[in-house]
Image (cartoon, rainbow, N blue to C red):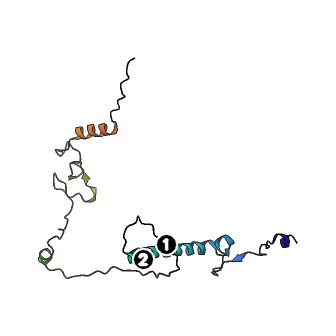
Amino acid sequence: MDHEKTECQAPPEGPILCVNNCGFFGSAATMNMCSKCHKDMMLKQEQAQLAASSLGSIMNGSTSKTEKEPVVAANIDIPAVSVEPKTISKPFLFGSASEENGDAKPKDGPKRCSNCNKRVGLTGFNCRCGNLFCAVHRYSDKHDCQFDYRTAARDAIAKANPVVKAEKLDKI
């Protein structure tokens, strides 16, 4: 009788299954869908809105992002297409690669110490002077380093600690 007076409907007797028939239970807050199906549906709607807005801006010819344009919501199924990169292999002819491509990058040789020319590979040490050195010559006193550490330290300290001066007070 209370329901007839307030015109409210009684809650359903049992749990409601997801409308997508995935086997999980849904709720009225998620439009009778389970949380996963609801999240997927919301993601598809956002993608459709983005696609519609970008399509509309392309059709209108405007590329400015500052313009406020209404976004039309539509359910568009956009199939995901996987793109595989194609590799084209050419037979290597001696001397022809450098002649055809003038901007071709020369092959990097093994990394070597700048002082003793020893191969260092992955264990090389980069110095602040910009050169690569082996374990013996990695310190600045072992390879006549031209980098001025004293000036670099002074600049770093000056940058980290700016001078702060207060305004002078007027005497009465």
Question: Which quadrant would the N terminus be assigned to in this image?
Answer: bottom right
Kindly identify the amino acid type of the residue bearing the numbered disc 2: Leu
Q: Residue at x 33, y 79 (%)?
A: 85
Q: Residue at x 50, y 75 (%)?
A: 72
Residue beneath disc 2: 55
Left or right, 54 with reference to 111: right
Label 1 close to label 2 by CB (< 8 Å): no
User: In the displayed structure, would residue 172 be above or below residue 63?
Assistant: above
Q: CA distance from mark 1 to mark 2?
A: 10 Å
User: In the displayed structure, would residue 36 be above or below residue 151?
Assistant: below
Residue beneath disc 1: 71
Q: Residue at x 36, y 70 (%)?
A: 63
Residue 103: give its label. none
Rendered image quadrant of residue 57: bottom left
**Label 1 vs 2, first from the N-terminus:** 2
Kindly identify the amino acid type of the residue bearing the numbered disc 1: Val
- Residue 129: % across, % down: 20, 48
Rendered image quadrant of residue 148: top left
In this view, which residue lies farthest toward the right?
1
Which class describes the residues within 10 Å of circle 1: few (<14), some (14-19), or many (20+)? some
Left or right, 1 with reference to 47: right
